[in-house]
């Protein structure tokens, strides 16, 4: 029966009546524009809007628009009233949550759903959202009222539906939010299904020897099961999460996500030591997990059954192959650049470098493949198994570049004077040319050409000379200018990018605690007798000094979050940058700072993300954080690290130990000077000798290690292969071996390491000062010279006592 209440032709009262009155709804007493607006209000209502407001709106199928009300067209004032009511819904749902006894956890709004589905290649249907046929919510208890009793909306616990069935009812998926005071999810809005597209189910492996028909049926069944897994949406991942993690490992991130969501979230071994800096105000866990997957290229793998899912973060094989392809492309580009550079700069024809370049340009494709594989390509005047023949004319030109020699102390030494005997006039000449490449910390390709010549002088003595020519010394494609301002020009007008900010990063170690550069040029007499191992250390080598004052990328991203309150997700590596403030527009500040740090920044679904341009190289260089924490704890407890920790450092890869930027951070930021014992990026030849000693110590069993420290380990009790790793010549079986380790910044008496005919002392004297060494020496060996004493930044070597003399492989 038609409503008998007086109808109003226009105004707010007419609109409210037509929205609420069910009798008018049944007789379609509503204007077409109002029906459209009502349907839109039901669709785009915020996720946090109370259901008693949304569900009070009537349902109008599209077919009902053929009939117009006798009340006439709705006025402009009525449209304004609709907008007012819609604004009230938004205000009531989110502006004052403390006025409601019910806490609503927003998931997302329809605009975000649409943007997400469009970006992920899941566009919504082209038809108007307002024309979709939605299932109507149950009618309110009190007729004509917009308010609904919350208790009436509480579902019966006995009739609860499984979350996965509730979230995946078929083609018409739903998006849900979790209310804190209800026992089951509550429908917010219906849309195309929004699955956990950042999650990958575990792969299905099938091994069968059945007949082809059974195999095909089983494969089809497993495929359907796999596709069903892809459509699952876990409601527990909608729980809001807040994070503030600086230089944290992925394991720490997963542990924190698991703690806040209650879900089992783990980390795979191949990404557990990757570091991340993340600041999140409050976001659903699923949004954070998706963005982490996007920034790092990792995958979340889901396992388990409904209601008991487990998530594991990993880097799948495809991502590993893609990362290796990036490194290969960098090296290929570097190699082409070196070749192009050599062709463009031929140089004088009589110079050694020019001749070596000409030899290099004549390499065959097979030679280049051998060189790129890490092996050395060799040429000799006389061909051998490991070297190709060198043309006589090329050998003659190279020999002529070594000038003349004079005999001094019984040896023929190079001398540029006119009286010197020309090396080109020697007899029985031989020449060697070799090429090998090394890869820098950030993918820079270094190609070196080694030249060696020998000849017989008039007195019958055979002498040789050698030189090394650097054909290419690239810094790496990944270290070139990023130019974020040009790459992110589409974000310049994004909201907030033109706001003036003052970014002043605060380093973890105060500026006054960062010390001052104490390089080799500033050494004075107070240091005493020093050797080259001291000058090549992180303490004194100019090339190994960080910028002062310095900061890390984590300090910068923390400053951005504190100044803008934006959600941040960025990778984190051990590297020190020059610390300076950035006071300008946010867009310019991000672009300038990220250019300085060789980072790329982007905006993605509200997240401000940062990724190092050289991440695919830095992942190989990074030292696991758990090792640094362990070493730092031992140092704080004992004052210094022992030989066991130095051996543990040496067992890392050569790439990690040769990474200068990583070493700067470990030495100066983590304050672990023992890292410099086996890591000497500017003196890699000596560093290899020390590492060989440390790895020799680490390969011994417990009983052998005790004998080695006491100097009672006999050479015959150690395998010959292991001995050859530290000493190139044969060691008599009855020789005794002892390990010698002097911690960094200890003073010692250098005469202990002198061999015959210098005085040999049977004990190593070291102290915390030069006076301590001299005092102890006077007590134990009064007749010995008090000098020279030395200061070390960390010494490691072996003492091999043959009974006749002593040898000191390693640092001495």
Image: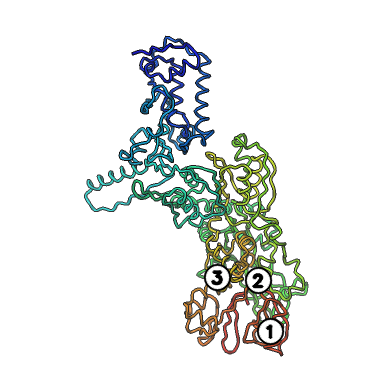
Residue, disc 2:
793
Vertical arrangement, residue 286 with respect to residue 386, above or below: above
Q: Residue at x 60, y 40 (%)?
A: 487
Residue, disc 1:
776
Closer to the camera, 756 or 631?
Answer: 631
How many marks can you see? Answer: 3
Disc 3 versus disc 1: distance between alpha carbons?
28 Å
Residue 565 image offset from top left, x and y in percent: 60, 42
Q: Is residue 710 left or right of residue 202?
A: right
Q: Residue at x 27, y 44 (%)?
A: 221
Sequence order check: which comes first, mark 2 or mark 3? 3
Q: Is residue 392 visible?
A: no
Tag on residue 645?
3
Disc 2 versus disc 1: distance between alpha carbons?
21 Å
Q: Is residue 544 left or right of residue 649?
A: right
Sequence order check: which comes first, mark 2 or mark 1? 1
Closer to the camera, 767 or 563?
Answer: 563
Identify the element where label 2 is drawn.
loop
Tag on residue 134?
none
Sequence order check: which comes first, mark 3 or mark 1? 3
Residue 497 image offset from top left, x and y in percent: 63, 37
Disc 2 versus disc 3: distance between alpha carbons?
16 Å
């Amino acid at each position: 029966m038609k409503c008998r209440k007086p109808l109003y032709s226009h105004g707010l009262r007419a609109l409210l009546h037509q929205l609420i009155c069910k009798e008018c709804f049944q007789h379609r007493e509503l204007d077409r524009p109002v029906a459209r607006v009502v349907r839109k209000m039901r669709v785009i209502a915020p996720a946090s809007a109370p259901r008693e407001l949304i569900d009070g709106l009537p349902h109008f199928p599209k077919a009902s628009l053929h009939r117009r009300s006798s009340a006439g067209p709705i006025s402009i004032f009525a449209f304004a009233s609709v907008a007012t009511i819609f604004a009230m819904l938004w205000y009531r749902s989110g502006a004052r949550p403390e006025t409601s006894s019910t806490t609503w956890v927003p998931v997302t709004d329809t605009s975000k759903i649409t943007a997400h589905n469009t970006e992920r290649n899941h566009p919504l249907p082209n038809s108007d959202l307002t024309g979709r046929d939605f299932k109507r919510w149950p009618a309110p208890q009190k007729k004509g009222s917009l308010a609904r009793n919350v208790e009436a909306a509480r579902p019966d616990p006995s009739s609860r539906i499984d979350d996965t069935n509730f979230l995946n009812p078929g083609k018409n998926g739903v998006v849900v939010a979790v209310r804190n005071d209800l026992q089951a999810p509550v429908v917010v809005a219906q849309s195309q299904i929004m699955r956990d597209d950042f999650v990958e189910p575990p792969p299905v492996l099938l091994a069968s020897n059945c007949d082809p028909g059974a195999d095909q049926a089983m494969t089809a069944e497993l495929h359907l099961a796999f596709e069903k897994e892809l459509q699952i949406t876990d409601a527990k991942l909608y729980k809001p999460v807040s994070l503030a993690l600086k230089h944290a490992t992925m394991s720490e991130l997963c542990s924190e996500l698991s703690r806040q969501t209650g879900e089992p979230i783990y980390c795979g071994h191949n990404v557990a030591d990757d570091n991340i800096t993340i600041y999140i105000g409050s976001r659903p866990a699923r949004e954070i997990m998706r963005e982490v997957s996007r920034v790092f290229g990792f995958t979340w793998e889901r396992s388990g059954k409904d209601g008991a899912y487990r998530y594991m973060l990993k880097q799948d094989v495809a991502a590993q192959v893609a990362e290796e392809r990036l490194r290969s492309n960098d090296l290929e580009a570097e190699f082409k650049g070196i070749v192009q550079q050599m062709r463009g700069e031929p140089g004088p024809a009589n110079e050694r470098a020019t001749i070596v370049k000409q030899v290099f340009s004549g390499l065959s494709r097979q030679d280049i493949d051998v060189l790129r594989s890490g092996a050395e390509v060799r040429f000799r005047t006389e061909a051998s198994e490991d070297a190709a023949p060198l043309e006589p004319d090329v050998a003659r030109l190279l020999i002529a570049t070594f000038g003349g020699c004079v005999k001094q102390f019984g040896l023929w030494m190079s001398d540029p004077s006119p009286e010197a005997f020309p090396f080109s006039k020697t007899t029985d000449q031989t020449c060697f040319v070799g090429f090998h490449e090394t890869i820098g910390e950030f993918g820079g390709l270094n190609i070196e050409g080694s030249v060696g010549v020998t000849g017989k002088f008039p007195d019958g003595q055979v002498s040789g000379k050698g030189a090394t020519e650097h054909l290419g010394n690239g810094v790496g494609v990944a270290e070139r200018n990023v130019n974020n301002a040009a790459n992110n020009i589409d974000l310049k007008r994004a909201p907030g990018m033109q706001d003036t900010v003052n970014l002043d990063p605060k380093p973890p170690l105060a500026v006054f605690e960062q010390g001052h550069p104490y390089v080799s040029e500033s050494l004075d007499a107070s240091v005493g007798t020093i050797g080259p191992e001291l000058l090549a250390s992180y303490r004194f080598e100019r090339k190994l000094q960080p910028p002062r004052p310095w900061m890390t990328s984590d300090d910068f991203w923390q400053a951005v979050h504190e100044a803008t309150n934006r959600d941040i997700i960025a990778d984190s590596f051990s590297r020190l940058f020059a610390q300076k403030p950035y006071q300008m527009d946010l867009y310019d500040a991000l672009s300038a700072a990220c250019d300085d740090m060789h980072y790329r920044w982007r905006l993605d679904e509200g997240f401000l993300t940062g990724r190092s341009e050289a991440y695919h190289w830095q992942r190989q260089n990074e030292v696991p954080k758990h090792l640094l924490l362990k070493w730092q704890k031992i140092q704080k407890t004992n004052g210094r690290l022992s030989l066991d920790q130095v051996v543990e450092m040496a067992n890392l890869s050569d790439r990690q130990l040769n990474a200068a930027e990583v070493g700067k951070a470990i030495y100066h930021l983590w304050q672990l000077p023992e890292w410099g014992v086996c890591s000497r990026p500017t003196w890699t030849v000596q560093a290899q000798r020390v590492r060989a000693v440390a790895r020799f110590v680490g390969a011994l069993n417990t009983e052998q290690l005790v004998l080695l420290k006491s100097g009672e380990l006999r050479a015959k009790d150690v395998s010959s292969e292991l001995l050859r790793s530290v000493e190139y010549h044969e060691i008599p079986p009855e020789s005794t071996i002892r390990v010698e380790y002097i911690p960094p910044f200890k003073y010692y008496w250098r005469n202990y390491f002198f061999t015959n005919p210098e005085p040999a002392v049977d004990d190593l004297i070291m102290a915390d000062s030069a006076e301590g060494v001299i005092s102890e020496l006077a007590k134990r060996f009064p007749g010995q010279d008090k000098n020279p004493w030395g200061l070390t930044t960390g010494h490691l070597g072996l003492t091999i006592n043959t009974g006749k003399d002593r040898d000191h492989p390693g640092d001495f």
